[in-house]
Image (tube, rainbow, N blue to C red):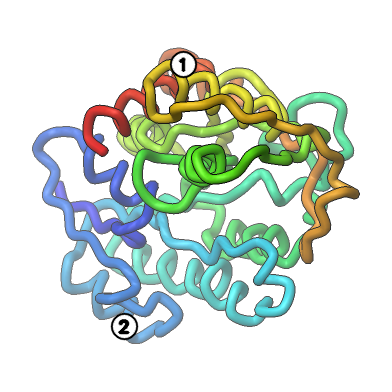
């Protein structure tokens, strides 16, 4: 079976490659080989492979920069999704697309179900919601949050670096969500795709925490693995103390009940997956 992965060099793209089921023939594209905002190029690339699945792991993810570059964010997160979905339909391929918890406003007191009303606060969230609509009702759409992996730019790697360089770190404590280990997300995507699922699903690790809680855990695991050689104060701050261009939801925990039922069980707790990643960094660098 042939599969086309778009965004293959990103955190999720690499994880999709490393967790792919045996027997697949995978073609991977990234920005250096395919401009997904070029409809002709997209149709040509999909036609050349004629895959059974097109997995879109590409996105404009610079949340704050999107406030001043919303046209570019829209081109990548929405318009290009429509191109990919249309090209997939043309060759009778199933389309799989990844979205975000930022489609919600964070005012809920309980985890957001897939059918909960959306109300994005930022340009990034708006463009990702438009991307969901562009993907179409026949697509498989998985919303996720706080994705990290052993390589690439992410919160875990940034915290490890800052904790080794600074006398203290200050981290927002009033934004609540759930981290997601990219290889676990990739495995869930493969499982749902293999079941020919369509519609909206949510996937993150189990549990919930603030960015502050996450940072404290990163330091504890980093010290235990000897990736850090000293403990530094982790100072909790409020969103108001950390000004950013984009507004972020204060609470964006996703309800994964239907997803966990579909894939045969819950994801590991975020703390367990954090330890897995820290171990991998220690082992492989």
Question: Where is residue 175 drawn, in percent x and y?
Answer: 78, 37
Q: Which residue is mark 1?
A: 272
Front of the two marks 2 and 1: 1
Question: Where is residue 193 drawn, in percent x and y?
Answer: 35, 39
258 shown above or below 170: above
Tell me if I can see residue 90 in this picture. Answer: yes
| Residue in view at x 43 percent, y 16 percent | 224
Q: Which residue is mark 2?
A: 41
Measured Cα–Cα span from mark 2 to mark 1 = 41 Å
In front here: 177 or 82?
Answer: 177
In front here: 139 or 201?
Answer: 201
Q: Residues within 10 Å of mark 1 (few under 14, many from 20)?
A: few
Tell me if I can see residue 198 in this picture. Answer: no
Q: Would you say the residues marked 2 and 1 are in contact, meaning their CB atoms lie under 8 Å apart?
A: no
The quadrant where residue 64 appears = bottom right
**Secondary element at tag 1:** helix
In front here: 61 or 257?
Answer: 61
- From the viewer's perspective, is 166 left or right of 113? left
260 shown above or below 116: above
| Residue in view at x 23 percent, y 45 percent | 17
225 shown above or below 243: above
């Amino acid at each position: 079976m042939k599969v086309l992965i778009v965004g293959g060099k990103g955190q999720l793209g690499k994880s999709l490659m490393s967790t792919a089921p045996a027997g697949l023939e995978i073609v991977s594209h990234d920005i250096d080989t395919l401009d997904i905002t070029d409809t002709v190029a997209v149709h040509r690339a999909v036609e050349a492979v004629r895959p059974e699945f097109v997995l879109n792991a590409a996105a404009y993810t610079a949340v704050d920069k999107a406030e001043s570059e919303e046209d570019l964010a829209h081109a990548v997160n929405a318009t290009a999704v429509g191109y990919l979905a249309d090209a997939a339909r043309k060759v009778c391929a199933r389309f799989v697309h990844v979205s975000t918890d930022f489609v919600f406003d964070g005012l809920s007191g309980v985890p957001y179900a897939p059918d909960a009303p959306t109300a994005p606060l930022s340009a990034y969230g708006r463009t990702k919601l438009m991307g969901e609509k562009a993907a179409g009702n026949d697509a498989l759409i998985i919303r996720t949050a706080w994705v990290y992996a052993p390589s690439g730019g992410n919160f875990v790697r940034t915290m490890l670096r800052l904790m080794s360089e600074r006398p203290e770190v200050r981290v927002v404590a009033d934004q609540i969500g759930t981290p997601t280990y990219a290889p676990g997300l990739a495995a869930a995507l493969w499982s749902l795709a293999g079941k020919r699922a369509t519609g909206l699903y949510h996937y993150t690790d189990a549990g919930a925490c603030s960015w502050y809680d996450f940072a404290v855990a990163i330091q504890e695991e980093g010290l235990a693995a000897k990736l850090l050689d000293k403990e530094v104060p982790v100072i909790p701050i409020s969103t108001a103390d950390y000004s950013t261009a984009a507004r972020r939801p204060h609470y964006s925990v996703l309800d994964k009940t239907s997803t966990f039922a579909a894939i045969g069980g819950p994801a590991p707790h975020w703390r367990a997956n954090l330890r897995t990643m820290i171990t991998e960094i220690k082992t492989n660098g």
